[in-house]
Amino acid sequence: MKSDSHTIHDGKMTHILDAVRTVLARKGMVATTISEIAHEAGVSRGLLHYYFKDKDDMVAQAFQASMETYKAGVMEIFEKAESAAELARNLCRALQSILIHDPDFFRLIFERWGLARRGPKMAGELTDFHQMFRNMLQEGMEKLIKRGMIRPRTPIEGMVVLLTGIVDGLGMQLVLEPDLAANEAVWETTENIVREMLEGTAG
């Protein structure tokens, strides 16, 4: 059996995907071997081939598993927000927490960016991720507008692209310079900009 959307929820699969993330973050896609991942996970190479077609499939599955977790967290932030200020604060703090406690997630994104240059299939998968993330942001913002919690003056379609760019850009910088993730000036500035966009006071 090869991996599919259901195997991500298998306990053994979750353990293996954690190992995939760890090794990829440490060595990168090119230098990582199946044997190293098997050793990190404490399983046989044969079991890895049971779950995955190849290393590319490992990256895709590890990325999807992480996205499921963080997607649920972002949706909860939108659902519970009672003001633009609260939404901006909680979104920024969630991003900060990921960068401090789970920087491997963004390293995995960067690996996928590299893979996207190898062909349309990989590029399409990364495009699908960005579209999913933007759609999630837009859906959450539209609900908050209806509730009168946020009042952006600029088109939502443009805002979600910009917000996605902020996430990607901060992720790249802060993974390369980890000390920035603990710099409160970075998060105060980001939070204020996001809040002003949501309140319609930016510019």
Image (cartoon, rainbow, N blue to C red):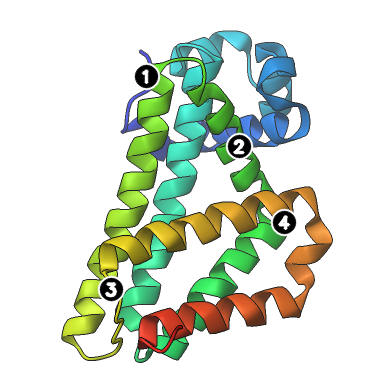
Identify residue for label 4.
174
Amino acid type at circle 1 is Lys
Q: Are marks 1 and 4 in contact (CB under 8 Å)?
A: no
Query: Secondary structure under badge 2?
Result: helix
State the image coordinates of residue 106 (x, y, percent, origin top left).
61, 46
State the image coordinates of residue 189 (x, y, percent, origin top left).
64, 79
Identify residue for label 2.
110
Q: How far apart, in angstroms, are the residues tagged by discs 1 and 2? A: 16 Å
Q: Residue at horizontal 34%, vertical 75%?
A: 78
Screen quadrant of the N terminus: top left
Q: Are marks 3 and 1 in contact (CB under 8 Å)?
A: no
Q: Is residue 34 above or below residue 180?
A: above
Identify residue for label 1.
121
Identify residue for label 3.
141
Q: Are marks 4 and 2 in contact (CB under 8 Å)?
A: no
Nearer to the camera, 201 or 178:
201
Are there few (<14), some (14-19), or many (20+) residues within 10 Å of tag 2? some
Q: Residue at horizontal 36%, vertical 72%?
A: 76
